[in-house]
Image (cartoon, rainbow, N blue to C red):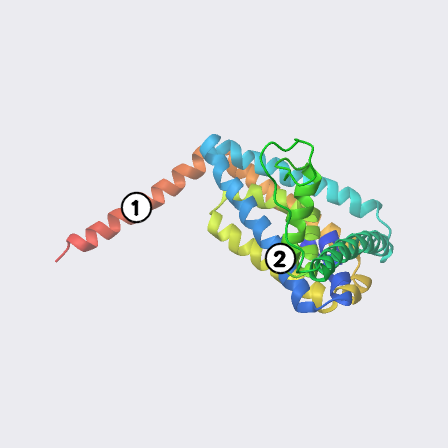
Amino acid sequence: MIVVSEIGDKTFLLAALLAMRHSRSVIFLGAFSALLVMSILSAGLGHILPTLISRRYTVLAASGLFLVFGVKMLHEGLVMESGTGKVQEEMKEVEDEIREKEVDMDVTTAEFNSLEQGRHSSPKSTPPRLLTGGGNKGSPGRPRHKRSKSQTQNGLKNLVYLVLSPVFVQTFIMTFLAEWGDRSQISTIALGAAHSVYLVCIGTVLGHAFCTFLAVMGGRWLATKISVKHVTLGGAILFLVFGVLYLYEGWFWDEVEGSISDVTSAATKIISTKSDSP
């Protein structure tokens, strides 16, 4: 489900276009790190839901989400034109967004370099001005303890850019923001609420790793060859199938739980009988 949801998506095109401009390994690490953090957070949030709500209602809610996504994707796939026009349109939007982010990154880097040059070019023989008691509050030498929010954010951004690669930071932030609230994130939350959180994390991470690897290695070429219409229709069928399965499981929860408990008790009796026999 993750693979079907992500191929041709905004995060897929984002990794593909960034890999054409920068190192593929850096782009893969940045995009995959963001998706890894997002997957763990989403699966963990889904794991917490059954402690707040009955597991039966959690499964029914997951079924409702999958059915809604399936119907929505089915409608999008039916009205979508065949070919790669949709991909080209999204690719142009992603290219414009990348261009804007790169301009901001260049401005930040230029400001940081100017600060570094100013610090190195300052005369070392000039002693610092010392303040004596009784100075005015408005004196220029008095340090300011309160900084504005924008100055704090700029300082943190400069610190992050200094510690990490700017390309890595740019890829991580853009991928994380693009994935937040996406269909795959909500699906991960629903799956984490209905199944084992560890299995959901492993499956989601593997799916994101596979899609990110495809995007970095040849995502732009692949995006122009595949039909988003067919991928969308295939994803709609998957969401509808899982939605029906979860609906059946949640609707007949007592019968399903009863059959599972009967099988478990029967297996326990067999094991205990074999252990007691000489």
Q: Position of residue 198 (x, y in %)?
A: 47, 51
Q: Camera-side residue: 173 or 180?
A: 173
Secondary structure of the residue carrying numbered label 2: helix
Report the amino acid beneath label 2. Answer: His
Work out whether mark 2 precedes mark 1 in sequence or the reverse, and give the earlier one. Answer: 2
Q: Is residue 190 above or below residue 54?
A: below
Q: Position of residue 167 (x, y in %)?
A: 70, 60
Quarter of the image that includes the C terminus: bottom left
Q: Is residue 197 visible?
A: yes
Q: Residues within 10 Å of mark 2 (few under 14, many from 20)?
A: many
Specify the quadrant of the image occupied by residue 76.
Answer: top right
Residue 48 locus on image (x, y percent): 48, 38
Tag 1, which secondary structure? helix
Q: Is residue 98 left or right of residue 175?
A: right
Q: Is residue 55 left or right of residue 169?
A: left
Q: Specify whether 176 is left or right of 75.
A: left
Q: Quadrant of residue 14?
A: bottom right
Q: Nearer the viewer, residue 61 or 246?
A: 61
Q: Residue at x 58, y 38 (%)?
A: 62
115 or 105: nearer the viewer: 115
Would you name the residue on which mark 1 appears? 266
Which quarter of the figure has residue 146? top right
* Label 1 environment density (alpha carbons within 10 Å; few <14, some 14–19, many ≥20): few
Residues at marks 2 and 1 touching, judged by CB atoms closer than 8 Å: no
Which of label 2 and label 1 is nearer to you? 2
Horizontally, is 43 left or right of 162 in the view?
A: left
Which residue position holds label 2? 208
Residue at 82% x, 52% y: name it. Answer: 100
Between the residue at mark 2 and the residue at mark 1, the CA separation in whole angstroms equals 40 Å
Kindly identify the amino acid type of the residue bearing the numbered disc 1: Ala
Residue pictured at 53% horizontal, 45% vertical: 43
